[in-house]
Image (cartoon, helix red, strand yellow):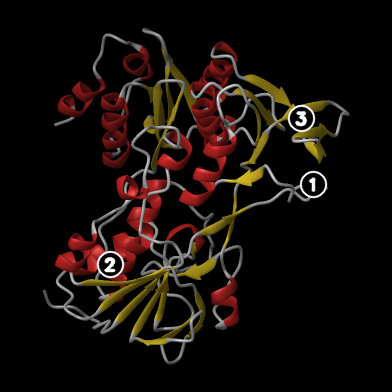
Amino acid sequence: MNVARDPGRVVVVGGGLAGFSAADQLRTLGHQGEITIVDAEPHAYDRPPLSKNLFDEDFSLASLAFATKEGLVAKRIDTVFGVRATAIDADAASVTLADGRVLAADTVLLSVGGSPRTLSVPGNDLPGVYTLRTFDDALAIRERAQPGARAVVIGAGLIGAELASALQRAGVAVTLLGPAPVPLLPVLGELLATHLHSMHVAHGVRAEVGVAASITAAGDALIVTTVSGEDIPADVVVVGVGIVPNTSLAEAAGLAVDNGVLVDRHHQTSAPKVFAAGDLARLVDDDGVAHRREEHWEAAQLSGQHAAYGMLGLEAPARGASWFWSDRHGIHLEATGRLSGEGELIVRQGGAHPAVFLVHDGLLVGAAAIDDNNTVRAARRLIDRRIPVSPTELADPAIVLKSLLRASR
């Protein structure tokens, strides 16, 4: 393949999904130069199972790994695991490691993700208080949360909900504490968000509205005190209130940073030899408008793949509507596009769970469904192809959404 830019020796700082996807895509696109992934973790592995599957019998680092050692060797991707990158030289495109080594490169990709946001309350660093971002975090929580234990999960978003479900299935008494009566309203709309949140109580999770004011030790146990004065006893506390992008390396290297590392559509930073992808990257349009960072699995994968195109000076394929999934209490949620803002919300009843659609100016702009990935897949194609839709047809459970694609041909 003829490329407009030869990235030469590439050092990928960060072995999460974005970093691995970039390295893998570079090889797929025919890049022959050296590729090295650097990460303080012991392997390049997937993160979503940490909140969903940490109590599974086969939960292991090997089961989460993107590729075996043999697979990485076959792709000629070198790795430096267990060592943290401490600095990058944006002009020289070199990476300094915590053990003193300096890796020379021609192109650097920053894909170090984010760190869990911590609570700024007394007791946030007590033994038994955790965040969940790494495999070791998951192991520590699993060790502490034995059957019959009491857990307080602070933060009722996607990660908090998944973890509460996993803890409940493991025989732990769970209190899920969040500031809103119904989480995820902007993401899923009121009807589906309410339906999902009600599953916690139906499965024995105590869902409480509140904000933690302090965490105190009480013998071997912990007490979470809310701002309203309620005391919630716990044996383990897990804080899941989002992440903060890891921008320290970029800032020290003089890169442009604003709630993330600023990148253009090629994922190139303000330094020509440095690219960024994943949770820490923040896209800036050609007209200077900065987008919100994306923190979903597919967004990270596509970000890394598109950074590979950018490093080669190639135009990446156009991205379609956004998509994410989540699992809790034995159900599988998928959503695509947007379900808030301008438009008419259409509800499709039938079965155990409703599906929801948002229509604006005759076009589908968002959809979500439970245990119905075919509907969401078809909805995503309707969005991407800008096929006009009828609210009546969307609301009718007898109409298979895929048929609307065929009818448009």
Lower sequence index among marks 3 and 1: 1
Report the residue at 43% width, 15% height from top: 354
- Real-space Cα distance between discs 3 and 1? 17 Å
Helix, strand or loop under label 2: helix
The image shows residue 32, relative to residue 352, as above or below, that is: below
Left or right, residue 255 beside residue 336: right
Q: Is residue 15 above or below residue 206?
A: below
Q: Tell me the residue that label 2 is attached to.
A: 23
* Secondary structure type for disc 1: loop
Quadrant position of the N terminus in the picture: bottom left
Residue under numbered circle 1:
123
Q: Position of residue 120 (x, y in %)?
A: 78, 51
> Label 3's element?
loop
Cα distance, mark 2 to mark 3? 43 Å
* Residue 185 quadrant: top right
Contact check, label 1 and label 2, Cβ < 8 Å: no
Q: From this viewpoint, which residue is outermost toward the front? A: 219
Residue 342 appears anywhere in the view? no
Kind of residue at badge 3: Gly
Quadrant holding the C terminus: top left
Q: Are marks 2 and 3 in contact (CB under 8 Å)?
A: no
Q: Nearer the viewer, residue 242 or 38?
A: 38
Q: What's under tag 2, amino acid-wise? A: Ala
The amino acid type of the residue labelled 1 equals Gly
| Residue 250 percent across, percent down from the top left | 54, 76
Dot 2, how many residues are within 10 Å of its Cα: few (below 14), some (14-19), or many (20+)?
Answer: many
Snapshot quadrant of residue 301: bottom left
Cβ atoms under marks 3 and 1 closer than 8 Å: no
**Residue at 59% from the left image edge and 81% from the top image edge:** 252
Disc 3 designates what residue? Answer: 210
Q: Check disc 1: other Cα within 10 Å, few if <14, some if 14-19, many if 20+.
A: some
